[in-house]
Image (cartoon, rainbow, N blue to C red):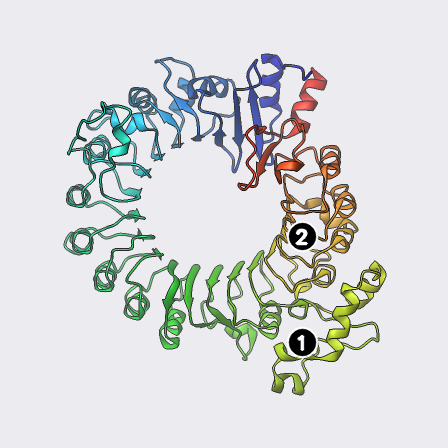
């Protein structure tokens, strides 16, 4: 039987917390059923994810005993229906940010909570319960003068009256974000509150005209986000083109009813934008991108396109003139070249072909680039990736997904005969590196050697004994993801990962990765810094390989091995013994065991109805032991 901790022990858990490093802590009631998980992402921020029967009032009471008062509170799946109480009032007085995500919120309880937070500057309410959307919200006009940022999201309904109440309660609003499935009514939402056969009230509908009137009434806006809504092009132009509103940030992602002409007019009017997001937005075309390149010289953050968008080569090259661009995310079909963009720090491309530069790397490549994401870029070749990794040496995050790359893109390899395979000879350049890497008899021989069942670890290490593999040049790399890379084998892991202090490693659904990679990683001193590991879908990995690796990763927090047929419950036993800080495990249904203090995520195809909740086992154990 698991001992029930006393309140003194629970207080000790909170006092023991390291605000810089700890990821989660758990609050447990006497019944061990009401659980709240607090996830610490930064100093002074608390995220609570708990069942609906765990009330916010009790959490605030517990937080009031902390020596460090949090500035940001995020509640998810938590109830807010309690009666008025002074518990946690000191916490609310110092709260700057408050977010309620999928919470069972009673309007009267929300009013008491908000009016007790005089310093609240940001309020986020995402997907509230049915009662909150139907019952009246008694917020008085001007009752939230400190709130400057309002974020509302509902997949069910956000009507005109409710939006008006928030609008009048926040007179100093400068940032507004609204996300909803549509601007139409949903009669099903009223079945709980109205008798069968009654008609739905006509005033409980969010209309575009009312939204236009509210936004135009506040011309101090510098940030506006209207995402995943069926916006009307003419009304949106009235808001952003025919008023004195000058935005610094605009997000219209997921709006599928906008026209290209509407976007062009908005861009020509809002010349002071430094952030623009049009991901999944209709109307994105060559004229829109041309206006962005010519009318937004101060743009720093740009996200646009989807799988159905195609840009011409000349238009994409216009992005090179945006010298202040820091973050760029493009999902389209076309060619993109890294020229200029010296301030670029994050680049994400989907479907697009990232073409390396043939000229000098110091003058052409953005030396400040820290994060590179490539997904479904089917035209990229091994040679392209070698050139990119050889020039982008300051990468911290590298995420690759569903790319047609082989080991030759990441390693300079030597086969058992001592022949260097990745040297770029003139013959390879003429015939194309991709063709050589797949059709050369020498390379086919190497692949057969690697895949052979009797191949030993020593043979594989000697095979990867070439000098200066491109992946090993990334000395600052902290996160590496190779997801769905069908042609990547252990050669890439063994030759490319050596002395980098990786914190996050994702090799999921790369079927040729085997225990040899796990054994190699376990022999690296730097593997102790690993925080998360994902080997889901790697069917050649078994308990033996993971046992050797988990023995060397005491700081592992998240671990996933879904659809790994060779992994059994023995790995969980090893994880419990050697990785006490683990708080999240993703497994198959038949692999779940009784594992205290750990939250399991299970495949949707075979749901598990009884899930545990979780926190660092070592923290609770240490406090209980000292007690």
The x and y percentages for residue 254 are 33, 52
Quadrant position of residue 431: bottom right
On screen, residue 437 above or below 425: above
Q: Which residue is mark 2?
A: 538
SS class, disc 1: helix
Name the residue rendered at 59%, 18% in the picture: 10
On screen, residue 334 above or below 508: below
Image quarter hosting the N terminus: top right
Q: Is residue 300 visible?
A: no
Q: Is residue 463 visible?
A: yes
The x and y percentages for residue 418 are 83, 75
**Crowd rating for badge 2 (residues with CA inside 10 Å; few <14, some 14–19, many 20+):** many
Name the residue rendered at 72%, 40% in the picture: 568
SS class, disc 2: loop
Q: Toward the viewer: 352 or 469?
A: 352
Name the residue rendered at 53%, 41% in the picture: 604
Q: Which mark is residue 437?
A: 1
The x and y percentages for residue 212 are 17, 46
Ranked by sequence position, the earlier of labels 1 and 2 is: 1
Closest to the camera, between mark 1 and mark 2, is 2
Q: Toward the viewer: 542 or 180?
A: 542
The x and y percentages for residue 256 are 29, 55
Quadrant position of residue 109: top left
Left or right: 154 as drawn, with respect to 231: right
Left or right: 539 as drawn, with respect to 381: right
Q: Toward the viewer: 540 or 93?
A: 540
**Crowd rating for badge 1 (residues with CA inside 10 Å; few <14, some 14–19, many 20+):** many
């Amino acid at each position: 039987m698991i001992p029930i901790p006393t309140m003194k022990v629970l207080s000790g858990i909170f006092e023991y917390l390291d605000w810089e490093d700890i990821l989660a802590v758990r609050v447990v009631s006497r019944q061990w059923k009401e659980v709240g998980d607090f996830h610490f992402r930064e100093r002074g921020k608390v995220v609570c994810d708990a069942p609906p029967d765990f009330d916010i009032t009790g959490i605030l009471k517990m937080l009031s005993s902390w020596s460090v008062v949090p500035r940001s509170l995020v509640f998810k799946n938590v109830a807010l229906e309690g009666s008025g109480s002074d518990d946690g009032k000191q916490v609310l007085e110092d709260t700057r940010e408050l977010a309620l995500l999928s919470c069972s919120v009673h309007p009267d309880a929300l009013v008491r909570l908000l009016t007790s937070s005089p310093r609240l500057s940001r309020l986020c309410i995402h997907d509230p319960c049915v009662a909150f959307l139907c019952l009246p919200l008694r917020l008085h006009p001007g009752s939230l003068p400190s709130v400057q940022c309002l974020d509302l999201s509902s997949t069910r309904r956000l009507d005109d009256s409710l939006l008006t109440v928030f609008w009048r309660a926040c007179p100093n609003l400068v940032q507004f974000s609204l996300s909803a499935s549509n601007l139409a009514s949903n009669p099903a939402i009223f079945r709980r509150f109205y008798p069968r056969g009654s008609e739905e009230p006509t005033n409980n509908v969010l209309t575009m005209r009312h939204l236009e009137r509210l936004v135009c009434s506040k011309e101090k806006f510098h940030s506006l986000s209207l995402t995943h809504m069926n916006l009307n092009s003419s009304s949106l132009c009235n808001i952003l083109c025919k008023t004195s509103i000058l935005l610094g940030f605009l997000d219209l992602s997921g709006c599928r009813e906008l026209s290209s002409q509407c976007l062009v007019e908005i861009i020509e009017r809002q010349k002071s934008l430094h952030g623009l997001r049009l991901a999944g937005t209709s109307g994105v075309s060559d004229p829109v991108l041309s206006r962005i390149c010519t009318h937004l010289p101060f743009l720093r953050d740009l996200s646009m396109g989807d799988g159905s968008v195609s840009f011409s080569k000349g238009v994409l090259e216009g992005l090179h003139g945006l010298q202040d661009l820091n973050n760029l995310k493009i999902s389209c079909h076309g060619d993109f070249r890294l020229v200029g963009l010296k301030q670029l720090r994050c680049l994400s491309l989907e479907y697009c072909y990232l073409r390396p530069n043939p000229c000098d790397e110091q003058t052409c490549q953005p030396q400040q680039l820290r994060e590179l994401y490539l997904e479904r870029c089917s035209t990229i070749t091994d040679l392209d990736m070698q050139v990119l990794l050889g020039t982008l040496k300051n990468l911290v995050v590298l995420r690759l997904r569903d790319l047609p790359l082989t080991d030759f893109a990441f390693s300079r390899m030597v086969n058992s005969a001592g022949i260097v395979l990745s040297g770029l000879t003139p013959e390879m350049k003429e015939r194309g590196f991709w063709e050589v890497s797949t059709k050369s008899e020498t390379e086919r021989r190497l692949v057969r050697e690697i895949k052979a069942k009797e191949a030993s670890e020593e043979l594989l290490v000697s095979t990867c004994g070439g000098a200066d593999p491109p992946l090993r040049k990334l000395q600052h790399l902290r996160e590496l993801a190779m997801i769905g890379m069908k042609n990547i084998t252990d050669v890439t892991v063994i030759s490319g990962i050596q002395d980098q202090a990786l914190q996050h490693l994702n090799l999921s659904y790369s079927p040729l990765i085997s225990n040899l990679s796990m054994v190699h990683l376990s022999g690296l001193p730097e593997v102790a810094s690993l925080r998360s590991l994902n080997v889901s879908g790697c069917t050649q990995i078994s308990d033996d390989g993971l046992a050797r690796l988990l023995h060397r990763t005491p700081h592992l927090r998240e671990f996933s091995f879904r659809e790994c047929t060779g992994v059994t419950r023995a790995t969980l036993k090893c994880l419990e013994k050697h990785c006490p800080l683990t708080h999240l495990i993703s497994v198959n249904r038949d692999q779940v065991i009784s594992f205290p203090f750990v939250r399991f995520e299970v495949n949707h195809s075979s749901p598990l109805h009884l899930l545990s909740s979780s926190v660092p086992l070592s923290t609770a154990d240490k406090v209980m032991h000292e007690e």
